[in-house]
Image (spheres, rainbow, N blue to C red):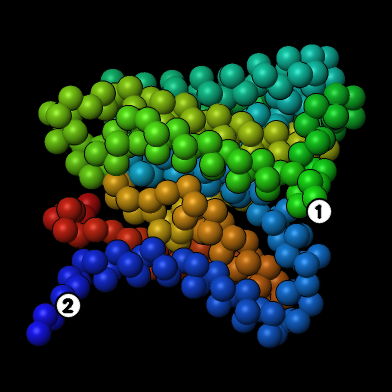
Amino acid sequence: MAVLFISPRALRGAAVTIAPAMVLAALVLGIGVFEPSFLSSYSLLVLTRESSPILLLALAQTTVIMLGGIDLSVAAVASLTSVLLALLLPQLGVLGLLAVLLLATGIGAAQGYVHVVAQIPSFVVTLAGMGLWSGIALSIAHTSIPVDEGYAVVGWMESTLLGIPVCFVFGVGGATLLWLALRWSSMGRYVKAIGLGETAALLSGVPVNFVKVVAFALSSLFAGLTGMALVARTYSGSPSAATSLLLPSIAAVVVGGTAITGGFGSYGRTIIGVLIITVLRVGIAIVGVDPGYEPLCYGLVVVCAAALTIDRAHVSVVK
């Protein structure tokens, strides 16, 4: 009689795959029991709308984290983008938007270049970038800059498509394009190989430096798109527009099942992680917990999710 044997590693992989969706369902049902109106179609559509900026910022993080790195500058880049858009949209319109997004992409590429050429950890490079871009945004505008003329260039993100917020559809569309790019090109294999073992990937002929620079450029591009969404949402640009979104965006990527050490993850997981974090934020408000405890919840979520997703078979020493 044959005995079916399932290895502990396979069980753990299945748990990491299924757990985020189960957690999301449990949170939605739990809050729905506490507040039945939460399960209405209107409330769920509002939930997707609220999750949109975090989704774009989390997508910015995902590729870099799959490589085993981190980008702490995305919120600062998003805030800087919002300020520049508020200044340029009235004069340049669409050209101003394209110029700002190109600048954001260049910022990411520059940070990636410094990371790979100077061999400085991504944590240090992007931490410095966070301070630099935040300082520049603050020096340009000490307070919010209202956007009236030229708002239509970004305002479409606040409209709806078949009742669903366009900003959320835009984020899901972006995730789909990223997934297709990694699924049907060598880039996806390179990202996974680097995440699982950078030295082995380098010896195998993988263009590690190029892949990293592209990943950081994509990260800042999506950070720029986040800034665009925030301008559409608030009718203004602010040097602190995305400051509060950094920790939730990292938490969303990790709680979605992407390994913080790299080599494992997907954009679909990130979408689920974003919804978990958004439901958690709403749940905290509904239950009546002091909003000051929100960062504590995110911190606990990151630690627990990281403990679950780290593949210790590939990481013998955790630094």
Image quadrant where residue 285 sits = bottom right
Residue type at tag 2: Leu
**Which residue is pictured at 73% across the width and 65% down the height?**
44
Answer with left or right where residue 194 lies relative to residue 112.
Answer: left
Find numbered disc 1 in the image and state the secondary structure of the residue it sits on. loop
Farthest residue, direction right: 148
Quarter of the image with the N terminus is: bottom left
For mark 2, does the 10 Å Cα neighbourhood hold few (<14), some (14 to 19), or many (20 or more) residues? few
**Which residue occupies the foreground of this view, 185 or 295?**
185
Check disc 2 and report the residue beneath it: 4
Pick whichever of labels 2 and 1 is earlier in the sequence.
2
Q: Which mark is residue 10?
A: none
Give the secondary structure at mark 2: loop
At a point 78% along the width and 31% down the height, the residue shown is 154
Residue 217 visible in image = yes
The spot of residue 244 in percent (x, y) is 61, 50
